[in-house]
């Protein structure tokens, strides 16, 4: 069996010893995380779902998630946001609502605390995984061949490969957060970015992340939850890796932008600190 870079197909591990009927899995085209048809389709054949969730990539063979729906495993990413619902109370119901339009764009998910179907609190949650360059299709087809399926596809012999669009993914993510975070900061709510550890490491190197708070501060409006994809005896599992936080001005700093609000705040703080003395202390009596 030739080595292959596809780690998961339609949510099923390709590296486990568990016997699977891959013919049925490929025919069904169903994602096990959403229980719907995989949305990643071939441009030339939209009736065919590609089904690739995660791949092994690079000289150091990183386990890279390339599908945002892969982050839905066990719904862990939502339970990891529960502490941000400060107004949630026992007896309230928890809801996960997808694809909600807000000023600045659309948000992937909202974690909502509700009572009698009335919203009591919420946190907005965005997923971001790496985009690939090139095509994973030849690797996918060779994988099926390894499993005894003979694909009717000339690309099985193709030398085409895929890469990771690190720079564009990172920059696009920060720009989108910059557009949205002020909306949530203005209403005193949280926006959470769910991202893989390797992508966050890249973003931290290429942009200014020195001012982020580790661990996260509950009072910050912008939170970043980083996850690793761990191989556990051939099965893959999401693990929370780190939590950090900042605010709207902090996202501007990440992008190298200077907002007027940040300048004005620094000026006010500087002027106040000049005047602080024993005489300005508030005393009672």
Image (cartoon, helix red, strand yellow):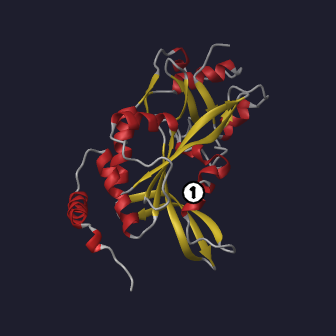
Query: Compared with residue 36, is residue 169 higher up or lower down, i.e. above or below?
Result: above
Q: Looking at the rendering, in which quadrant would you find the N terminus? A: top right
Quadrant of the rendered image containing residue 203: top left
Look at the picture and state if 57 lies above or below 93: above
Q: Which residue is found at the position 39% from the left and 37% from the top?
A: 204
Q: In which quarter of the view is residue 262 placed?
A: bottom left
Horizontal relation, residue 169 to residue 78: left or right? left
Q: Residue furthest right?
A: 19
Is the C terminus in the top left, top right, bottom left or bottom right quadrant?
bottom left
Residue drawn at 48 percent across, 46 percent down: 214
Let me know if residue 275 appears in the view: yes
Residue occupied by mark 1: 81
Report if residue 43 is visible in the image.
no
Seen in the picture, residue 154 relative to 234 is either above or below; the reply is above
Taking the image as shown, residue 13 lies to the left or right of residue 177, namely: right
Locate residue 114, reporting x and y percent. 60, 73
Along the line of sight, the residue nearer the viewer: 42 or 263? 263
Residue 250 in the image, given as x and y percentages of width and height? 34, 52
Badge 1 crowding class, 10 Å Cα cut-off, few under 14, some 14 to 19, many 20 or more, is some
Res. 147 image quadrant: top right
Q: Position of residue 271 (x, y in %)?
A: 20, 64
**Is 180 on the left or on the right of 216, as rendered?**
left
* Residue nearest the observer in this picture, 210 or 141: 210
How many discs appear? 1
Residue 37, given in percent of the width and then of the height, sits at 61, 46
- Considering the numbered disc 1 on the image, is that residue within a helix, a strand or a loop? loop
Residue that appears at 60% across and 60% down: 82
């Amino acid at each position: 069996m030739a080595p292959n870079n596809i780690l998961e197909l339609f949510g099923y591990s390709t590296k486990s010893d568990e016997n699977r009927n891959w013919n049925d899995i490929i025919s069904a085209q169903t994602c096990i995380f959403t229980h719907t048809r995989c949305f990643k389709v071939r441009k030339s054949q939209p009736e065919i779902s590609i089904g690739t969730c995660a791949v092994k990539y690079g000289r150091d063979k990183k386990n890279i998630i390339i599908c945002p729906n892969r982050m839905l495993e066990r719904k862990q990413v939502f339970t990891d946001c529960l502490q941000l619902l400060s107004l949630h109370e026992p007896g309230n119901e928890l809801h996960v609502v997808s694809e909600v339009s807000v000023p600045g764009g659309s948000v992937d998910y909202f974690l909502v605390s509700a009572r009698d179907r009335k919203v009591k609190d919420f946190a907005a949650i965005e997923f971001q995984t790496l985009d690939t360059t090139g095509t994973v299709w030849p690797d996918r087809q060779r994988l099926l061949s390894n499993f005894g399926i003979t694909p009717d596809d000339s690309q099985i012999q193709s030398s085409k490969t895929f890469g990771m669009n690190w720079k564009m993914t990172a920059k696009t993510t920060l720009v989108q957060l910059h557009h949205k975070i002020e909306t949530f900061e203005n209403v005193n709510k949280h926006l959470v970015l769910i991202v893989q550890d390797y992508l966050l490491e890249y973003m931290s190197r290429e942009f200014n992340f020195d001012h982020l708070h580790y661990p996260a501060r509950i009072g910050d409006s912008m939170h970043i939850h980083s996850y690793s994809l761990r191989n556990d005896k051939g099965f893959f599992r999401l693990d929370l890796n780190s939590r950090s936080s900042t605010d709207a001005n902090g996202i501007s700093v990440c992008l190298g932008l200077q907002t007027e609000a940040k300048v004005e705040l620094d000026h006010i703080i500087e002027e106040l600190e000049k005047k602080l003395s024993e005489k300005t202390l508030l005393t009672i009596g």
